[in-house]
Image (cartoon, helix red, strand yellow):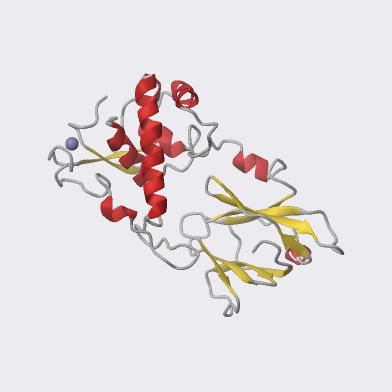
Amino acid sequence: MRGALVTGARLGKPLRWPLGCAPESLAGHHVGDIVRRGKYLWLPLLKGAAGEGAAGGLLMHLGMSGSLALRQAAAAPGPHDHFDLHTSVGTLRLNDPRRFGAVVWAASLVDAPAATLLQRLGPEPFDPALTPLSFHTALQLRRSPIKAVLLGGEAIVGAGNIYACEALFLAGIHPALQADRISRPRAARLLEALRATLARALELGGSTLRDFTDVHGASGTYQAQAAVYGRADLPCVRCGTPVRRVVQAQRSTYFCVTCQRR
Ligand SMILES: [Zn+2]
């Protein structure tokens, strides 16, 4: 979409947060380089040659069930299509049946409301500035179970439920272990396991547990080769002990009591 001219926008039913500007004020901007931060997408909107209104951008979040699609000729909006951005290369449409998603205008990523929404996000998993030492330091500040800390996204972003379970298995760490009790070598192993897990998942197009599809409509296949996730009572792939399922912070955790130590 880079360089596309915005020709208009349409709002459906209210999303999690209001857009924060009149949809018609988006027309005339050009789309800049789209970036991702945590689960947010930032779509910069630049002033056109003769554009009016300040440049800024749209911070987008898919919520629980949202999906984005770019179509050259979009059909009439359906009951769950709650935001359309019409551009010279097609219509970017947010479909969001549960409406936990959002599209929010901000002047920049460091201005409200974007800055407020992003301020608690931990480092990106593949950011070279995230080192075994800095990761260990972040874990030292947290007394909750490591599984909950990973899902919380303040020590690192990107480790959703399936990836947190798999990385903890790979690193041999019990999911209930308190984060600040994890030694420096184990923190290093966990960071390595998180990166390996996420890299593999990216190769496989992510995980489709219910209805996730990418922007081209393709499902992910990572979940089919998970070592522990979704395998309650089945033998551990490493030692044969039945995989245990427990509930932590209202989410299912799968782990092996033999391979994963406190
Ligand atoms: Zn095992």
Front residue of this view, candidates 64 and 220: 220
Q: Quadrant of the C terminus?
A: top left
Front residue of this view, candidates 103 and 229: 229
x%, y% of residue 147? 36, 35
Query: Residue drawn 62% across and 71% down?
Result: 91
In the image, 251: left or right of 123? left
x%, y% of residue 61? 56, 53
Q: How many marks?
A: 0
Q: Ligand 1 sits in which quadrant?
A: top left
In the image, 146: left or right of 104? left
Q: Is residue 104 above or below residue 121?
A: below
x%, y% of residue 96? 51, 63
Regarding residue 182, the answer to whether it shows in the image is: no
Query: Residue drawn 60% across and 79% down?
Result: 73
Q: Quadrant of the N terminus?
A: bottom right
Query: Residue drawn 47% across and 23% down?
Result: 133
x%, y% of residue 125? 48, 39
Query: Residue drawn 19% across and 32% down?
Result: 257
Regarding residue 190, the answer to whether it shows in the image is: yes
Q: Name which quarter of the figure residue 11 lies in.
A: bottom right
